Image (spheres, rainbow, N blue to C red):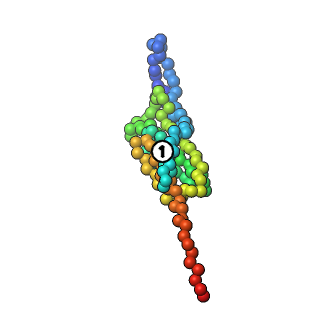
């Protein structure tokens, strides 16, 4: 959708320009990875993204996080001019080791930071197996 907007440049000459919504820019979010004895924590910065706009996919050892931020436009209005790129998409992929318990991964989005908790598989304690007579 395009709209004509009359603007005045530095020379006070009116000029008409077409304004179109640009394609979203794809960014790789900054990530901190922390490790404890029990978990690996992944903290991804995705400012302006809420939890409804985040997708996390797990395929084998590949973990992909995606999120998008859109410029809010009030109902009944249309964005006709912007001085910055209004829409951003974030995407980043990670390869997980075999020590992660894929069934227990959790994610929380708060204040523009996605916090993924990747629990480690609990190692089985060594045990002695008793041999019985028949």
Tell me if residue 81 comes above or below residue 104 in the rendering.
above
Q: Nearest the camera: 128 or 93?
A: 128
Tell me if residue 54 comes above or below residue 60 in the rendering.
above
The quarter in which the C terminus is drawn is bottom right
Q: Which residue is drawn at 60% across and 49% down?
A: 95
Q: Please indicate, yes or no, whether residue 79 appears anywhere in the rendered image.
A: yes
Query: Can you identify the residue that label 1 sits on?
Result: 43
Outermost residue to the top: 11
Q: Residue at x 50, y 42 (%)?
A: 32
Left or right relative to 13: residue 61: right
Left or right relative to 116: residue 130: right
Q: Nearest the camera: 65 or 3?
A: 65
Quadrant of residue 130 in the image?
bottom right
Left or right relative to 72: residue 59: right
- Residue 58 place in picture, x, y as percent: 56, 54
Q: What element carries label 1?
A: strand
Q: Residue at x 56, y 44 (%)?
A: 92
- Residue 54 place in picture, x, y as percent: 48, 47
Quadrant of residue 133 in the image?
bottom right
Q: Nearest the camera: 47 or 106?
A: 106
Q: Residue at x 54, y 65 (%)?
A: 124
Q: Please indicate, yes or no, whether residue 51 appears anywhere in the rendered image.
A: no
- Residue 22 place in picture, x, y as percent: 53, 34
Label 1 crowd (10 A; few <14 / some 14-19 / many >=20): many
């Amino acid at each position: 959708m395009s709209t004509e907007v009359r603007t005045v440049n530095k020379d006070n000459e009116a000029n008409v320009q077409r304004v179109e919504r640009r394609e979203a820019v794809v960014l790789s979010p900054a990530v901190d990875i922390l490790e404890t004895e029990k978990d690996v924590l992944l903290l991804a910065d995705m400012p302006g993204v809420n939890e409804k706009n985040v997708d996390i996919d797990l395929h084998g050892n590949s973990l992909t996080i995606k999120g998008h931020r859109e410029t809010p436009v009030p109902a009944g209005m249309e964005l006709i001019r912007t001085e910055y790129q209004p829409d951003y998409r974030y995407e980043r992929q990670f390869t997980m080791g075999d020590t992660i318990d894929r069934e227990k991964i959790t994610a929380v989005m708060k204040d523009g930071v996605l916090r993924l908790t990747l629990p480690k598989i609990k190692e089985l304690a060594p045990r002695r197996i008793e041999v019985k007579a028949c």
